[in-house]
Every structure is written in structure tokens, then in C-alpha cells.
């Protein structure tokens, strides 16, 4: 059985996009004559991979079934793929093998007690648990308070909190995220990697279809075929309650690989900074809201710089 049309398209578009970003000089080849289109030629990638041009052309057309891991590794080296991109290429190859396809796991909406206890025990970092589709499954009080616009927008729309849907479909996202563009690119890259790992996830396909239809920004970034498996760094937010926050964030994974929601995201402020003061103030505000859920939300005055 041959790969599905969608799988062939993903393989083709990914390889073409990676080939198009390289110059001969980057891979140790002479520049040669002026090129009509940017990037390496197919025959150059074939030489670097140690295969025939005809064979590589078939691969770039999506005919990846039966290709050995050694050959895929050679193509990955020829295209200078990073670790995330290499893993994505191997996931696409795995998805093209019908015998290796794994049925989509059911949506996990119940968080087991020990996992929620762990999340709740972290008090000075904002923590939430997500799945590969970027659905927020659980959070501690500070995590909910920090991402209040995400939860509020989902409540208004009548949907589960989803970071990708908030980023691209909720106008509040452009005010909330200081670097909206960088976050948008990372969000799409995370979904692209998940699509390679879980090609039979219907909910993921529906989410990607919804975002592609409703957001030109998402559609353009999706076409770039950039891939990311982990998301960490510095996040700058304009919070509606405490104002500007600059936080470091890390991602970690729960040990059980069969768990749908296993990605923990933690947001922390640098000690001794105004951002730590504001995060403490937000934690205090969250505790107040928790004890008085019917109280009207009132912005608090953040500490001065």
C-alpha cells in the first residue's frame, strides 16, 4: 500500500522546502552558474546523499515507503536537517508504512490525581499541562491566572482552551503576546511536528483545517514546513491584571509515553526582579479570585520598575 496523498504531499513539500533554503556553498559544492530558483538542485542532494538522481526524485515526490533508515539519515545530513527536522522526516516515513501506523489515542480530558497534585504543589511558577494539539488540559492557580485571556476566550467561544486557536483566532492574543510573530511561528512548528507523529489524529487534522481556513497568518506559516518539538526560552506578556511580565519558560514531559497530555510547561520569573514581584502579586490575586469566585475582576497596581 502506498502512502496517503496527504502524507506524500507532506514529504514532498518538506523536502522541497529544506532543499530550497540551502546554497551550494553551505554544503561544500561549487556555486556554478546562476540559478533560476534558489536552493540546491535535486541532483546535488542526490550526490550528497549517495543515491541516484532518479531515486531521490522519487523520494521527493513522496514515495518514501520502504526507504531504509540509513538512506533517510543520509538525506537528512545532505539537507542539513536539525534534530527536530530529522525526527519529523523519520515520523513521515513511519506514517507511510501502513503496518506501523498507530490508531489515534482517545482524547484525554481527565487528569489523574498524582499529576494534578504535582501541578498544584508548584506555587511560584505558572504551570499547565498540554497535549500535542496544544489543548490545555490542567493548570495550577497561577497558570490559570497567567493565561487568563486564553481561558476567558475559550469560555466565550464555548471551546476547550487551546493555545493555537487563541494565538491565531482571538484578537486578544496580539495584545497579550509582546512577540506575537515569534510565538506564532513556534506554535505552528509544534503542531507541524505533532502532525508528523500523529498523522491519524482526527482532532488535530480538524484543528489544522480550521486554522488554515480562518487565519491567513497560520496558513502562511504552515506552508513553511518548519518543525519544533520543544518550546522554551523567554516569554514577554502584557497581562491584563499586573502589566508587563518577562518570564523564562521550560517544557518537560511526563514519563508515561502512552499519556496523551504529557507536556508540562512552567513559567518562572528571575529572582529579585520586578517581574518576580508582579508574578507574586498575580499569585496573590489568583488566590483572592479562588476564594471569591463571584467577585468582580479588578486590576491591581503592579510594582514600579
Image (cartoon, rainbow, N blue to C red):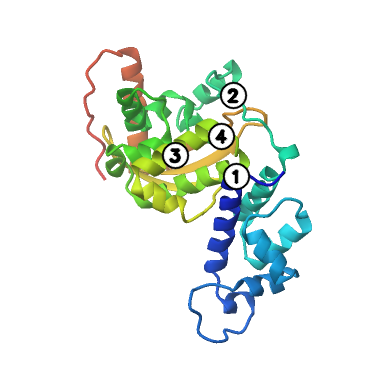
Q: Residues within 10 Å of mark 3 (few under 14, many from 20)?
A: few
Q: Label 3, on which residue?
A: 209
Say whether disc 3 or disc 4 marks the residue closer to the N-terminus.
Answer: 3
Contact check, label 1 and label 2, Cβ < 8 Å: no
Tell me how far mark 3 sits from mark 1, CA to CA.
Answer: 15 Å
In the rendering, at what x and y percent does residue 12 appear?
A: 58, 57
Q: Residue at x 56, y 52 (%)?
A: 9
Q: Which residue is mark 2?
A: 106
Comes first in the chain, label 2 or label 3: 2
First in residue order: circle 2 vs circle 4: 2
Residue 253 on image: x %, y %:
61, 35
The mark lying in front, picked from 3 and 4, is 3
Mark 3 and mark 1 residues within 8 Å of each other at the beta carbon: no
Labels 1 and 4 touching (C-beta < 8 A): no
Q: Is residue 224 above or below residue 229?
A: below
Q: Marks 4 and 2: in contact by CB < 8 Å?
A: no
Disc 2 residue crowd, few under 14, some 14–19, many 20+, Cα 10 Å: few
In terms of depth relative to the viewer, which is nearer, 214 or 172? 214
Q: CA distance from mark 2 to mark 3?
A: 20 Å
Indicate the position of residue 279 as horizontal and vertical percent values.
36, 34
In the rendered image, which residue does mark 1 sit on?
Answer: 196
Amino acid at each position: 500500500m502506498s502512502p496517503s496523498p496527504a502524507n506524500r504531499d507532506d514529504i514532498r513539500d518538506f523536502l522541497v522546502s529544506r532543499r530550497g533554503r540551502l546554497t551550494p556553498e553551505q554544503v561544500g559544492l561549487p556555486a556554478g552558474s546562476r540559478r533560476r530558483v534558489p536552493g540546491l538542485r535535486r541532483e546535488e542532494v542526490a550526490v550528497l546523499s549517495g543515491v541516484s538522481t532518479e531515486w531521490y526524485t522519487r523520494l521527493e515526490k513522496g514515495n518514501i515507503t520502504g526507504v531504509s533508515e540509513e538512506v533517510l539519515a543520509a538525506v537528512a545530513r545532505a539537507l542539513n536537517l536539525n534534530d527536530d527536522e530529522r525526527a519529523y522526516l523519520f515520523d513521515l516515513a513511519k506514517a507511510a508504512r501502513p503496518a506501523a501506523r498507530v490508531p489515534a489515542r482517545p482524547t484525554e480530558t481527565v487528569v489523574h490525581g498524582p499529576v494534578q497534585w504535582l501541578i498544584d504543589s508548584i506555587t511560584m511558577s505558572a504551570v499547565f499541562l498540554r497535549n500535542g494539539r496544544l489543548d490545555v488540559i490542567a493548570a495550577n492557580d497561577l497558570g490559570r491566572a497567567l493565561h487568563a485571556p486564553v481561558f476567558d476566550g475559550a469560555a466565550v467561544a464555548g471551546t476547550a482552551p487551546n493555545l493555537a486557536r487563541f494565538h491565531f483566532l482571538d484578537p486578544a492574543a496580539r495584545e497579550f503576546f509582546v512577540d506575537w510573530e515569534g510565538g506564532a511561528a513556534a506554535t505552528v512548528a509544534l503542531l507541524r511536528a505533532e502532525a508528523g507523529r500523529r498523522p491519524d489524529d482526527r482532532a488535530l487534522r480538524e484543528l489544522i483545517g480550521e486554522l488554515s481556513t480562518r487565519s491567513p497568518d497560520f496558513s502562511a506559516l504552515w506552508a513553511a514546513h518548519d518543525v519544533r518539538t520543544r518550546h522554551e526560552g523567554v516569554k514577554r506578556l502584557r497581562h491584563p491584571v499586573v502589566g508587563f511580565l518577562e518570564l523564562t519558560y521550560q517544557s518537560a514531559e511526563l514519563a508515561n509515553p502512552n499519556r496523551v497530555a504529557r507536556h508540562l510547561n512552567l513559567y518562572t520569573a528571575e529572582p529579585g526582579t520586578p517581574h518576580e514581584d508582579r508574578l507574586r502579586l498575580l499569585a496573590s490575586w489568583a488566590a483572592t479570585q479562588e476564594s471569591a469566585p463571584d467577585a468582580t475582576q479588578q486590576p491591581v497596581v503592579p510594582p514600579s520598575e
